Image (cartoon, helix red, strand yellow):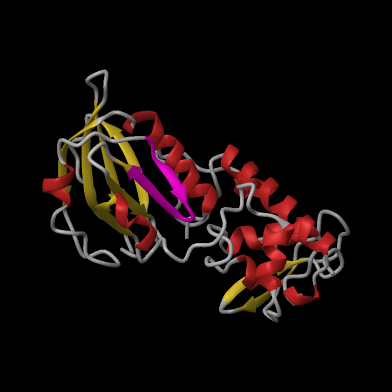
Amino acid sequence: MPELPEVETVCIALSKVVISSRVKNIKVLRKNLRWNIRENIQTNLEQDILKKPYRRGKYILIPTYKGNILLLHLGMSGQIKIKSNNNNTLKHDHFIMVIETKKNKDYSIIYNDPRRFGYIDFFNIKDIENHFLLQKLGVEPLSNDFTTDYLQKNINKRSKCIKNFLMDQSIIAGIGNIYASEILYRAKVHPLKSVDSLNKENLKNIIDSTKYILRKSINVGGTSIKNHLQPDGKLGYFVQELQVYGKQKLKCNKCNDLIKKIITNNRATYFCNTCQK
């Protein structure tokens, strides 16, 4: 599943074409994604003007001048493609939005999703705080609100392991399985360590590592594992920077011990038993 860096990469790419663009045409080729696309999306979105996209957790939000929000969620296998002069519809293209920029150039914003676990929604901005996908999201890990005080407040007698804590979207928005393993490796914290046993230094290292790993991945276009591509079809190159994820039985770059793989909460977890305590 695309995580925060991949979604941010898509958001940055969309920003280059959608800001102040007019929506000329909407085509819903298949409405039954994870949830059905709303019936009013075509009539209410066409002819509206788009504002700057931004990311909340793993969701892309595009405000409009009429006071609405277009929400894009990539799910497990979704991809946003940005095409100029696009006349070809490919298999698994479910949603196409044709826009006209201020320079009178047309682009097609295409949502392609083989597994259909993603979602596209359209709603009034006044409903954003109560939207069922957004209302319970935790802190943004790249924001100034992601602090040791925030973590200590949310730990508060919890006994879950730190790996699952990092991936809890109601606490920290946007971190998934790949980056949780990478963050904990850099922070030198064992993924099974209980959060209520972490000291302030552990928490500071986790915060610093989170910001470092996420920003580094965004800078190289995310991680191309399985089917994630950038909107222009290019690969994300953070896969070349991975230290533990998918590296089981290979030597740790720091101590030469072998990277281990275990299953936690039905997800693969990778770590170095020597470097991470």
Q: Position of residue 6 (x, y in %)?
A: 50, 48
Q: Which residues are magenta?
A: 52-62
Left or right of residue 14: residue 140: right
Q: Which residue is at 49% across, 55% downward?
A: 57
Q: Is residue 248 magenta?
A: no
Percent across and percent down for residue 183 are 70, 57
The mark tally for this picture is: 0
- The answer to whether residue 80 is left or right of residue 24 is right
Residue at (84%, 60%) from the top-left corner? 201
Name the foreground residue: 66 vs 32. Answer: 66
Is residue 248 visible in the rendered image? The answer is: no
Q: Residue at x 38, y 64 (%)?
A: 133
Q: Nearer the viewer, residue 259 or 177?
A: 177
State the image coordinates of residue 52 (x, y, percent, origin top left).
Answer: 38, 35
The chief SS type of the magenta part is: strand
Q: Quadrant of residue 189?
A: bottom right
The foreground one among 258 and 48 is 48
Quadrant of residue 254 in the image?
Answer: bottom right
For image coordinates 33% across by 37% down, the residue present is 82
From what the image shows, is residue 147 above or below residue 107? Answer: below
